[in-house]
Amino acid sequence: MNTNNETRKTRDALHDEFLKVWGNPRGWHALTIVNHTTVGIRFMVTGGIFFLIGGLLAMLMRTQLALPEQDIIEPKLYDQLFTMHGTVMMFLFAVPVLEGLAMYLIPKMIGARDLVFPRLSAFGYWCYLFGSLILMSSLVLGIAPAGGWFMYTPLTNNVYSPGPNVDFWLLGVTFIEISAVSAGIELTVSILRTRTSGMALLHMPLFCWYILVMALMIVFGFPPLILGSILLELERAVGMPFFDVARGGDPILWQHLFWLFGHPEVYIIFLPAAGIVSTLLPVFSRQPIVGYRWIVLAIISTGFISFGLWVHHMFTVGIPQLAQAFFSMASMLVAIPTGIQLFAWLATLWTGRPVYHVPMLWLVGFLFIFMIGGLTGVMLALVPFNWQVHDTHFVVAHLHYVMVGGMLFPLLAGLYYWLPHFSGRMPSDKLARWGFWLTFVGFNTTFLVMHLTGFLGMPRRVYTYQAGMGWELPNSVSSVGGFIMAMGIAMVLLDIVLHFRFGRPAGSNPWGADTLEWATDTPPQPYNFISLPDCPMRHPMWDQPDLQTTIAEGHHGLSEIDHGRRETWGSDPVSGAIREIIHLPGNSWLPFYSALALSVLCISLLTRTYSMALIAVVASLLLLLSWSWKNCVYLEADSAVKPGYPPLHSRTFNGPGLWGMVVTLLADGALFLAILFGWLYLRVVAPNWQAPDTAPLAWLPLLISGVLLTVATFWHHFIVRRLRAGRDDHLQGQLWGIAVIGLAHCCVFIWAWSASSLVATQTAHDAVIAVILMYQLFHSGLAVIMTALQAKRVAYGYVGKTAPYEIAVVKPWWIYTNAVFWLSFLAVIMLPIAWRSA
Amino acid sequence: MHIDPLEKKWAYAAVGIAGLFVGIILIDALFHGINAPSHVETIDSASLHLSEEFDEDNLGVQVDESGNITIRMVAGRYGFYPKHITVPADTSLTFRWVSMDVLHGVHMPMTNMSTMIVPGYVAQVTTTLPKPGEYPLLCNEYCGIGHDHMWSNVSVVAKEHWAAPGKAPSKGGKDND
């Protein structure tokens, strides 16, 4: 807000000052970088490599299927190929690449300098990289998972799939999901709390809306799969029978948990891609998007409806007719919001003056292919039709039309569009057009014909087929098409590689775009913006032609960097009014080391060396503790804040950390609800469910333990209230007191558990109860550790009435732990008592 | 964040109604045992040969006293048993399937005969096959290394050319309509 010309530093001097704080180290220390631009690009490049690997697996399969009765690839390898193709494309390519793109773009689009938890994003990246390497190593060793990417049990239990193959999938994918969930949390909080001054929700670029909904869907959608994977791994490794019919489990529970994640996953991938479309179309049509509010409503309703569709993957399981009708209807309903978006896009094209640059080519390809995929989707939503083509190549064709059309084509459009932003250079028009047309023709040749193969009855996941079924010609055509498509992708790749060397410099805002990310340098500096502009408008770059210059010269907010900390605005989630200055942490080895410790844990669980696993758990815990310790409040900062500025986030009760905690607890709650769902499902459906006559645990010790927990929670609540009133006397002693009561609660709890007659490997009932108890103990234990840590930090002044931030962050964890306890108590103790008397 | 008081009241009312409905469903399911019908018929997959109905010589096509045709088949890695059956066209057929190991799916291309076969349960499908001809029965639920070879054959013959197999009246097989 310094507009005085005499005192303003020059552009270069400002740049040098910012670079001192924001600069990225080189060499080995590049591993410490937490900046969102670097992390985003790392996600995208790594994901791109996995896309090529996944494509290679597909090419091998198409070679094998080109002619009938070939045996180029033996069935054992073929099964690994299709399992890994699906897994790689879904978990290692689609989600991470889109998250990477979002991480790269979101802060720039909302006028922030970085994501709100930069170290978390770096940690997510390392988890993704290490987890992927562990998963891919199985393919190299020839022991890759071979149960299909959906891992249906009982095929995947230890009776029918002995050996580590399935464990690689369960543990590797769960490890990778840490990165998905942490990105989901981070993107949600960043979009809601770090928009630049005046950017109200309805001023956000549409891309941010799409990413916000995607991030929330990740938060709710991934936990059921994480739970499912943990349960199946526990069944395999320890013998807890969640899915074993003979011991009171049910294999269908796995399918419910898997598709409860699996269907939202499709929209988690589609929404960001649609966000790319909604960003690019207006730019190339030279016209604001038609129906902004309608699109926002469509995005939100897609997010909701997509959680009510999962059973349409299971129409042949033998689901009750009422449920089939419900899910069939919901599957058709979801076409409505998608239809709204399609009409908005077409109307934007219609009313604008479109220019057909390369990104636009991919967009038109998208519209064509995705439309067909959507139409076959409506066909599949009809139950009787679904029965005829279930698990045939028709479904393979449909899902590739939706995924390649709905995700890869927009992604490549986006890649070409933002390429000048990444590198500062333009791609070659000629190569790019070749790449597009080869991919487009190749894709349709492969998959349009495949609908026919499916009608003729060819099932999925077969390594070969007999001649004389009429399947030979369509399969050969599909294989040829596949190779044409591969050539197209190779052309795109070549173009991208060459453009770094031969591309002409892009200059600023080469496409004449309207959104803030083009106000940075191209390629961008790590700090994005020298000063953070007011942005109460949807098209800042169209409305303020000199915005880039005024930002770089420091005419806007927060252009001082006096006390050497990375800073960005914290703002109101709805109006975008400034609320605080957020201090962001800088580069660190901690994310790298923590992810490394977790990957040691993953490997030792894979090899079943449990002593090693224990060491890895302790190491991870110590690293995370030291992470929390060093993430400290900047005590000297108060004197450096100029009058008229908002407070630092660490001096508030309602900072971004609290929001991060609440969103984390939403994910955590989704996991807990999935456990309770599993328990109720098995009780209602499983044919051999055996519940004991008495409650599984003695109620009195459990009640005592619960009362202790409640006392600790209320005490914690009480000291937060005292802090709000500005009193922090005896704070340290009180925090120690809370920790001790929490510890007592844990001890009584463990004692009650050990005195019970639960045998987790005997019946599914006992196994589920054991999981609920473990979940409770994990939360109680963490609450105690966090509170003890804070008690220690009081002595250093990191926690107190001037810095109440951390205690406010921990409070929801106590409340949540308490809620989980009483809900579990109700379910595990009270319900069985009520049943007995009923 | 400001929320209009009236909007707040409506939100409470909506949450309350949703809670009431969920509560009713839960109480019905947990205390009164009222559930949507789902997989009501169960079977011990580990000892099919001991069950009356899916005993080896009770498999295949059977006609009961009132002329209803029931086909009992077992799916197991990697085949459907019996390997070949002959059924009449244009007639209502009731297929009853069980699995002896993992999940299987069964599909007759170009017909409505498609179901997943879940171990522990009996899968029942009633359908009519209009066109005579030779049909394959394919496993469409991936079941392991020999999944590709898991199939058998169905001959659908015109109604007037079909003769009921001469067999003892079928055992077991409750009708769960």
Image (cartoon, coloured by chain):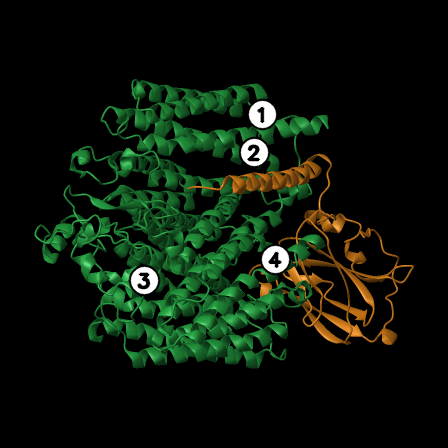
Is label 3 in contact with label 4 (beta carbons under 8 Å)? no
Residue A330, numbered circle: 4
Q: Are marks 2 and 3 in contact (CB under 8 Å)?
A: no
Crowd band around label 2 with a 10 angstrom C-alpha radius: few (<14), some (14–19), many (20+): many
Identify the colour of chain A in the image.
Answer: green
Q: Secondary structure at mark 4?
A: helix
Q: Are marks 2 and 3 on the same chain?
A: yes
Residue at the far right in the pictured view: B65
Measure the alpha-carbon separation of dots 2 and 3. 51 Å
Residue under numbered circle 2: A769
The CA distance from mark 3 to mark 4 is 35 Å
Distance between the Cα atoms at labels 3 and 1?
59 Å
| Chain letter of the residue beneath label 1 in the structure image | A
Q: Which mark's residue is nearer the viewer, 4 or 1?
A: 4
Disc assigned to residue A515: 3
| Chain B drawing hue | orange
Camera-side residue: A86 or B62? A86
Which of marks 1 and 4 precedes in the sequence?
Answer: 4
Q: Amino acid at mark 4?
A: Ala
Give the labeled residue for mark 1.
A697
Residue A608: where, in percent of width, then height? Answer: 42, 42
Marks 4 and 1, Cα distance to the nearest angstrom? Answer: 41 Å
Based on the displayed image, in which of its 4 quarters is residue A420 positioned?
A: bottom left
Image marks 1 and 2: residues in contact by CB distance under 8 Å:
yes
Number of other residues with Cα within 10 Å of mark 1, as a class: few under 14, some 14 to 19, many 20 or more: some
